[in-house]
Each structure stands twice: as C-alpha cells, then as structure tokens.
Amino acid sequence: MAMTLDVNGKPMTVNAAPDTPLLWVLRDELGLTGSKFGCGVGQCGACTVLADGQPIRSCSMPIEGLGGMKITTIESLGGTHPLQEAWVKHDVPQCGYCQSGQLMSAAALLAANPKPTDADIDAAMDGNICRCGTYQRIRAAIKDAAG
Ligand code: FES
C-alpha cells in the first residue's frame, strides 16, 4: 500500500503494509538508519523518534496511524544541535547504540521544557535504556544544552 508520511519536514511516499512498524519503513525504505533496532517490543527506546513532538517507539508503531503526523528522526538534528554538541563535550556515548533514541527523547524534553530539573530529566528519560550506564553523562549533557 502506498502511503505518504511527513518525515523530517518532507513528504515521503512509502510502499508498505499498514501494520508495518515505522522503524522498518524508516530504515529499509527511506534509508534513515540512525534510529536503531534494540528490543523490537517497545521496551528499550533505541528506536525512539518523535511524532508531532512526542517520543514514540518506532519499532512498535504501525505506520497506518501516522498519516498527517510530523515524524522527526535523529537525522533531523543535523549533527550540530546543541544536544549533540553537549553529547560530544560530555563524552556521553560508550557503545553508542542507544544514543540516537536518547537524543530524541532529550530533544522532546527540551522543546517542551527548556529548563528541566533533574527530576524532569529522569522522568523524561526513564524509558530509554543504556546498557553501558551512561545515565549520569546524559543528564549532565541535557543540563548543559539547556544552558
Ligand atoms: Fe523499539 Fe526497543 S527497539 S523500544
């Protein structure tokens, strides 16, 4: 089935069954491979992208519900987003696999709450798991990016 999705501000026509998870479409059809497959069941956050500014688990989000929503992926941050610069400054990543999902959750947080407290950060980032345990550096980088 052909369907148009708004991805990073551009209309993208995709050919996939309505129940295809967004992550598959992003990676396999659109070549946007920054979003990662971790658990595949909505538990780890590695696949996090934004839909109308809200973090969603793209591995378990069928495309049929996303028509008309603005999908934003890690590629939209462009490598120069203040969060990405703070990530580098604080040497946040270790293996790096979860970090695009971490960054998208952090971007959604700062867009909604430009001066988050530690508790706000912990609440917003709670669903993004990092097996390397970079949580303290993530929190520091978010605070730094918030200024
Ligand atoms: Fe989607 Fe883990 S890969 S939540």
Image (cartoon, rainbow, N blue to C red):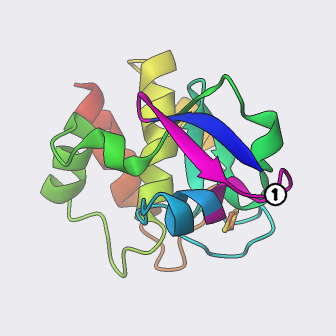
Q: Nearer the viewer, residue 71 or 96?
A: 71
Q: Residue 6 in the image: x percent, y percent?
A: 54, 31
Q: Nearer the viewer, residue 89 or 16?
A: 16
| Left or right of 125, for residue 64 | right
112 over 46 or under it: above or below: above
Residue 119 occupies quadrant = top right
* Quarter of the displayed picture in which ligand 1 can be seen: bottom right
User: Which amino acid type corresponds to the residue marked 1 in the rendered image?
Assistant: Ala
The quadrant of the rendering that contains the C terminus is top left
Residue 117 in sight from this viewpoint? no
- Seen at 54% across and 62% down, the residue is 29
Q: Residue 68 in the image: x percent, y percent?
A: 67, 22
Q: Residue 46 in the image: x percent, y percent?
A: 57, 64
Residue 32 occupies quadrant = bottom left
Q: Which residues are magenta?
A: 8-24
- Helix, strand or loop under label 1: loop
Does the magenta-highlighted stretch encompass residue 65?
no
- Seen at 74% across and 72% down, the residue is 40
Q: Which residue matches tag 1? A: 17
Q: Nearer the viewer, residue 1 or 57?
A: 1
51 over 16 or under it: above or below: above
- Seen at 81% across and 41% down, the residue is 64
Outermost residue on the right side: it is 19
Residue 58 in sight from this viewpoint? yes
- Seen at 64% across and 25% down, the residue is 69
| Left or right of 87, for residue 45 | right
